[in-house]
Amino acid sequence: QVQLVESGGGLVQTGGSLRLSCASSRRTASNNGMGWFRQAPGKEREFVASVSWNGGNPSYADSVRGRFTISRDRGKSTCYLQMNNLKPEDTAIYYCAVARGASATTDPSLVQYWGQGTQVTVSS
């Protein structure tokens, strides 16, 4: 079993920045794609960003492309999400995810492990 520990969420004003971190309890996650999904109140969980096992092939949702940057440190089995120019519509619980395979994934059904989530709130 892989445990994912997220940190970095919080309250920020519109236009501000936050950096989310996700640390895996096992180094085996370094061989899997990792990513971030989010879920706002009353909405389904949606894809945000993902990256393959070696940090390549980053993928972004259209709503965050150009503002968010995903990266990872394979040696530490850690994934990061730098979020800039935040908007109120970015408010959600953000979940770290480890994919079943080595590729980046945008499909939540292909996620093998989920983190507990971290709240991001953007005030207007």
Image (spheres, rainbow, N blue to C red):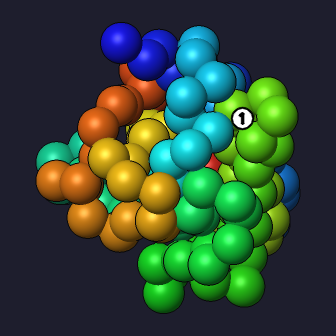
Residue 52 sits in which quadrant?
Answer: bottom right
In the rendered image, the quadrant that contains the N terminus is top left
List x then y, in percent, for residue 36: 50, 51
* Residue drawn 64% across the image and 24% down it: 27
Q: Taking 13 as reference, is 5 above or below it?
A: above
* Residue drawn 55% across the image and 34% down it: 29
Q: Is residue 18 left or right of residue 1?
A: right
- Is residue 31 visible from the viewing direction of this image? yes
Q: Is residue 62 left or right of residue 82?
A: left
Disc 1 crowd, CA 10 A, few/some/many (<14, 14-19, 20+) = many
List x then y, in percent, for residue 17: 83, 54
Amino acid type at image mark 1: Thr
* Residue drawn 71% across the image and 62% down it: 55
In the rendered image, the quadrant that contains the C terminus is bottom right
| Element class at badge 1 | strand
Residue 121 sits in which quadrant?
Answer: top right
Q: Is residue 91 left or right of residue 105?
A: right
List x then y, in percent, for residue 35: 51, 53
Q: Nearer the viewer, residue 39 or 3?
A: 3
Q: Taking 100 as reference, is 9 above or below it?
A: above
- Is residue 124 visible from the viewing direction of this image? no
Q: Nearer the viewer, residue 61 or 101?
A: 101
Q: Which residue is mark 1?
A: 78
Q: Taking 22 as reference, is 105 above or below it?
A: below
List x then y, in percent, for residue 16: 83, 57
* Residue drawn 47% across the image and 78% down it: 61
